[in-house]
Structures are given as C-alpha cells and as structure tokens.
Amino acid sequence: MMTCQIGTERFLKQEILERYHDLRAAFSRPGFVTFKASSDWDVKRVGKIRSIFARYKGLSIGRQPNDETNSASKAVWEIVGDLRFDRAHVFPRDLAVPGTNNFEPHIDRRCIEIQNQLVQTCPYRDQLAGGANDALCPAERKETVLDIVTISPEEWYIGYHIADDWRSCQPGGIVNLHRPFDSVSRAYLKFEEGLRWSGLPVRVGSRWLDIGAAPGGASQALLARGADVTGVDPAEISSVLCKNHNFRHLRGRLNQLKRNHFRKIRWIITDMNVAPNYTLDVLEDFALRKETSIQGFLFTIKMAKWELIADIPVCMQRIERWGYAHVEIAQMQFNRQEIMVSVRR
C-alpha cells in the first residue's frame, strides 16, 4: 500500500506497474493506492521499490473498520498476531492538494489519539523503542514500524515497513514541519523539506545561488542554516531577507549579469515557474562552465499539466550527462504540481 498526493494516483500506478511486473493494481482512493502481490513478496522488497510519487510504502496485512478507538486498536493487535514492531505510526491520506485552502499534509489529532491507544493496548508495550509514545517521532533506521493509514474515520488500513532511508523514517513519510511566522512564501516549506530529504550539506558559510529568488522562501531555508545566499531576480525580495547580512540580492535577469558574480558559488537552488527544459537550460549552463565548480543543485521541475511527467526520463538522462554522481527525484509532501530534483557530486 502507498500514499501519494491527490491527483497523482494514476501516475503512481503507471510507474509501479511498468517497473514491477509481478504487481497488480488493486483498491485505491484519492491519495491512497494498493497493489496485489504474489505470496513471496516480503517487507524487504517493499523498501527497495523506487517511485517518484509514493510518499509512503508498506506491506498491507489487513483492513480494520473502525468502531470505537480503544476497541479498534485492540482489534489491530489481533490482526497483527505474532508480528513484532519497534513502534507504530498512524497517519491519514491527504484530504486536498497541498496549499489548497491552507491544507498541508500533517498528522492530525485523530491519528495522534489512535496511536496513543495502540501503544496503550500493545501486548508487549515494554519492548517498544524509545519515543514510541510520541506520534510524531520518526523511526530509527532498520526499525520495523506498524503502520495505520486512516482512509476515513470508519476505515483503517494496517501494514508495516522497515525504515531504511530518511523518508521511510517519517510517520507516513510526512515530515513534521510548519512555516515560521516570518516565512515569506510556501517555498520555504518545500525547500526545507527538500534539504532534509536530499541531505545536501548546507554548512555555515557555504555559498549558494538562488535563481528566481523572489520573494525569498527558498533562500530563507538556507539562511536559517547559516549559508551565504545570493538571490537573483528582477522582482523585489522580501525585506525580511534583505536585512540578513548573509543575503545579497542581484536585481536583474541571470543572462544580464556578469559571470564573475558567481565564481565563488558552489551550490544552486531554484524554484522557477517555467517549462522544464528552460530550468534545465539554465542549470546546465552552470554545470558545464569551466570557470565555476558547482557541487550540487536542488530544484523543482514544474508540470503545467501532469502529462508532462512522460518527459521526466528524458530530463533525467540530460541531468545525468552533467557528470554528477548522485541524482535523485521525488515529489515532496509540500510540492504541488511539481517534483524535486537533487544533484550532487
């Protein structure tokens, strides 16, 4: 079973069925997709599935119609049987597209209540890992996690997975992240998430270029880590950033600026609302310049219509020709009609 952003279900099904021929599409709802597997599938194989759109992946073991929280949580342990887990994560499928009417994917209060009841009714409660009482606590690598996906107040899906990377450690693949009171745009959320997902080394004093920076949300995520950021944009940057002595605004278009402005830049971030090929043209110019030494990129590729996802394999081949060792692509929980790409040496 997998969760994803509402609206991407058919693309998730398509990429999984094209790559894994022993899976068959099964029950689905907006933001939730399941597949039927042969009996030799185990939880370790689930962890090896690669997907752009799947936020969470787990092996389903049953469905629990919900009556009353306490009795339902006891029924979960009956379904689980002799399986043993280090902790439990309870999370909902998305109810809307991120950013719509202020909706952002999150672990809601109801899920927290269910998780607390699961811990209280666990038959081996004293054996659970540290922090198991905290519904928002990420798992540690290699822990086995019991997963409850709340499809509706009346229906839960039960499964489990082994936490083997940053995303699979988060409850439901959802990072517990909120916009600071002074954040200037939603770009802060998606790039804060992207930096955590990618593991790019944003160190104090590291030199970053933000192309198309206005109003400055992506730069804020870097500045909070102590990076030196140069923002390029003909539009105004928020005064919140301009007051930061680690931020410099080059007002104008990139092709109007002298190249010596960028000789010390080592990392590039961008969230330009343009066609995918235009974004790649701009970044490829930096990647192949002899006078610069760009160590990596973090950027979004916009999809004016989701059908453009068919062009992603060609985009990836183009990026790989830049000669960087690590290229990763995924849809972040705070992305909308776009995907995030991480590139590093």
Image (cartoon, rainbow, N blue to C red):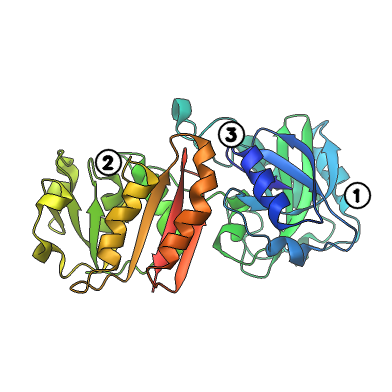
Task: Residue type at mark 3: give it.
Answer: Gly
Q: Position of residue 39 (x, y in %)?
A: 90, 59
**Up/down of 31 relative to 314, above or below:** above
- Across and down, in percent, residue 162 comes to 70, 64
Above or below, 199 against 61 in this view is below
Kindly identify which residue carries mark 3: 7
Q: Is residue 219 above or below residue 11?
A: below
Instruction: Give the mark nearer the N terminus: 2 vs 3.
Output: 3
Q: Residue at 88% across / 43% down in the picture?
A: 75
In the picture, residue 151 is in which quadrant?
top right
How much space separates mark 3 and mark 1, taking CA atoms? Answer: 34 Å
Circle 1 residue: 78
Quadrant assignment, res 292 = bottom left
Q: Secondary structure at mark 1?
A: helix
Residue density around tag 1, few if under 14, some if 14–19, many if 20 or more, within 10 Å: few
- For label 2, count other residues whose C-alpha is less than 10 Å away and answer few (under 14), some (14-19) or many (20+): few
At label 1, which amino acid type do we have? Glu
Q: Callout 3: few (<14), some (14-19), or many (20+) C-alpha neighbours within 10 Å?
A: some
| Left or right: 49 in relation to 327 | right
Dot 2 or dot 1, earlier in sequence: 1
Cα–Cα span, label 2 and label 1? 47 Å
Which residue in the structure is indicated by mark 2?
182
Task: Nearest to the eye among marks 3 and 1: give it.
Answer: 3
Distance (Cα) linking label 2 and label 3: 30 Å
The picture places residue 109, in percent across and down from the top left corner, at: 60, 36
Q: Is residue 297 left or right of residue 290?
A: right
Camera-side mark, 2 or 3? 3
Residue 252 appears in the picture as rendered: yes
Q: Secondary structure at mark 2?
A: loop
**Residue appearing at x 91%, y 49% in the figure:** 78
Q: Amino acid at mark 2?
A: Asp
Is 53 on the left or on the right of 102, as rendered? right
